Image (cartoon, rainbow, N blue to C red):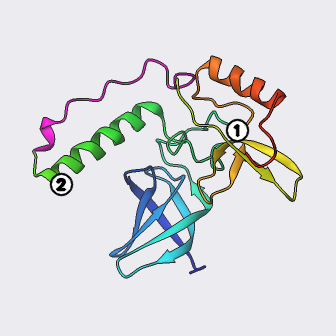
Amino acid sequence: IGDKISLEIRDIAFGGEGVGRAGDFVVFVPFTAPGDLVDVKLTEVKRNFGRGMLARLLEAGPERVEPRCQYFGECGGCQYQHIAYTEQVRWKSKQVADLFQRVGGFDPAVVAEVIPCPQPYAYRNRILVRSQWNKPGRCLHLGFVRHDCGLVADIESCAIAAPPLNIALTNLRKTPPPKGG
């Protein structure tokens, strides 16, 4: 743990982690995209696989895009925003087909094509906002649970939430819940 290795990300696991290999050793790395060449700091090492965190992007793969959300990488709500939307749809379809084949023994062809959302941002009509008192900062955080721990990332607005939800989040900030929740 703590060692750094260089990898090429070749796949995306269910849940959005990039997958690279060092020989036969598989490494899962959040916030990476297929084709990325990366330096990874290992955070967990098991017998057949490991997990790591992106230490440095050496070369961006062709599917990588700049995430629209300023909180991407901190907030735990989105795992795919750094991948072009058409490729997100393709990868998610592949993941479902692979799951049907692996678990149920079905031919992947039985999975119909994914119908892409007409707008990949400002579409979500339901969000679960959390509140948490930030003792060191002496302030209340309103937002979503971080991807890397149980703390709440303080979010002013969400790029995938429908506009009325962001208005409601702004109003909630004006009259927040009492300290502690």
Q: Position of residue 42 (x, y in %)?
A: 54, 74
Amino acid type at circle 2 is Val
Is residue 110 in the magenta section? Answer: yes
Secondary structure under the numbered disc 1 in the rendered image: loop
Residues rendered magenta in the picture = 107-124
Q: Where does the C terminus fall, quadrant-wise?
A: top right
Residue at image position (75%, 28%) is 172
Residue with the mark numbered 1: 70
Quarter of the picture holding the N terminus: bottom right
Tell me the amino acid under the disc marked 1.
Gln
Q: Is residue 67 left or right of residue 62?
A: right
Quick check: 74 above or below 90?
below
Could you tell me which residue is drawn at 51 percent across and 53 percent down?
Answer: 32
Report which residue position mark 2 lands on: 103
Query: Secondary structure of the magenta portion, mostly?
Result: loop
- Find residue 136 and report its horizontal and vertical position in percent: 87, 59
Q: Earlier in the sequence, mark 2 or mark 1?
A: 1
Q: Nearer the viewer, mark 2 or mark 1?
A: 2
Residue 131: name its quadrant: top right
Asked if the magenta segment contains residue 48, the reply would be: no
Q: At 46% from the left edge and 32% from the top edge, which residue is drawn?
A: 85
Find residue 155 and report its horizontal and vertical position in percent: 72, 38
